[in-house]
Amino acid sequence: MWQAVYEDHKDDDFMVIAVAQESRGLETAQEFIDEANPSYVVLIDQEHVVSDLYNLTNVPQAIWIDEGGQIVRPPETAGSHDGWRAMNREDMSMPDNSAATIAKAQETYMNALRDWAKNGADSKFAFDEVAARAHLRMPTDNTALAFANFYLGQYLYQNGNQAEGIAFLEAAVDLKPESWTMYRQIMNLKEVGQMGFAADEAFFARVDALGAERYYEPPDLEGFPTELGFEPVA
Amino acid sequence: MVTVLTEAGHKDVPGDNTRGDDLWLSSGDAESATGWTLKPEGFCQGDVCVPTPQGKEAEFTDGDAVNVTAFWRHMGRPVLHDSAGDTWMLGNSASERGSALESLEAPDFTLPDPRGAMHSLSDYRGKKVFLTTWSSW
């Protein structure tokens, strides 16, 4: 997904680091890496350390970091759009208007990223410090406790104590219900779902329960479609 | 033996180290498992020291042994363990995570690539880094 932007801008002192939030590591990640065959840096994060450090709630979320190691765009949805929720769940087909909205969202985000890759601090899409701080989502005590539960749950689950592991993992989701990453990683650990993504009736019921709330919070980016584009299930 | 989990990984520590809801380690084991150790100034990681609360010395230290969970809770950090008391999670607090983000200095981490080579975010200083996440699920 990021190969073209990386190839086009790698001579502009630009690097892509794509971190897999992947409890089962290469067991589940390898085929996706083989398929994408990226020349940028791919890392495997079995403990979800990056989600913990940056208070992430979903994938793909991205952070823009300047040459000096400073955050110039805090964590935000990396171009994805809730239009996917209008998908036909039988045949996975997408209504035309949703497909167009999704494409527009991707294009808007990608153009902003390319502008920054090329122009760095001069890009209008790089926030100054005040704006960057204003866009941070700060962790709460429940966030910190959720990640502690998540670490312990994963360790127990993968080291011979599945029953207790699941209890800690589910406690993590209860403490941080906005984290689709935790919720879906647990489904993947339990080997729920098919067709390459962890989805079952419970997942779709949870998505439908969002109503007008977002699965992918739109980034604060001029031109990015902020409308759902479909009538959410009440 | 107990297994101690921190953000830095997991470490097995030999011996019977639990007393109720507390985990007591020798100062050497505490350092290898958590990076924190007992010094005259208190419980320390590098130059950072948390003094033992006055009047509560017996809850926090016992000769060379240190109640790492008492210090952890004293620092506002989450402590969890499994029902058998075999596996302990020493977490990080919201305030330390939050102030790291608020500094805008991108929190560093070190992770393996698919071939097992380790990369730190800070290795890429001097470049604009698009740090993104993905998953198979």
Image (cartoon, coloured by chain):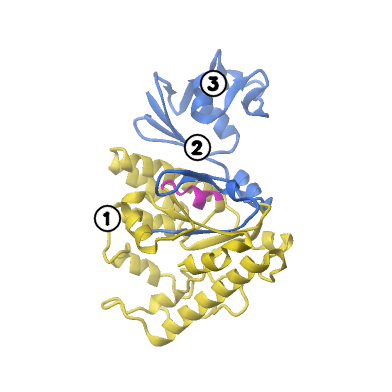
Q: Nearer the viewer, mark 1 or mark 3?
A: 1
Q: Quadrant of the N terminus of chain A?
A: bottom left
Q: Secondary structure at mark 1?
A: loop
Question: Can you name the residue that lies furthest to the bottom here?
Answer: A96
Task: Report the residue that reaches farthest toward the top.
Answer: B63
- Vertical comparison of A142 with B44: above or below: below
Local crowd size for mark 3, using a 10 Å CA cut-off: few (<14), some (14–19), many (≥20): many
Identified by mark 2, the residue type is Ala
Report the mark closest to the observer, 1 or 2. Answer: 2
Residue A220 in sight: no
A49 over A111 or under it: above or below: above
User: Which chain does the blue colour mark?
Assistant: B
At x 64%, y 29%, the residue is: B46
Q: Which residue is mark 3?
A: B66
Callout 2: few (<14), some (14-19), or many (20+) C-alpha neighbours within 10 Å? few
Residue at (35% x, 78% y) in the render: A87
The label on residue A191 is 1
Disc 3 is placed on an element classified as: strand
- The chain ID associated with circle 3 is B
Magenta-drawn stretch contains B98: no
Sequence-wise, which precedes: disc 2 or disc 3? 2
Label 2 sits on residue: B8
Residue A231 lies, in percent from the top left, at 43, 83
Task: Name chain A's colour.
Answer: yellow
Q: Looking at the picture, does residue B96 appear above or below residue A112? A: above
Type of the residue with mark 3: Val
Badge 2: chain ID: B
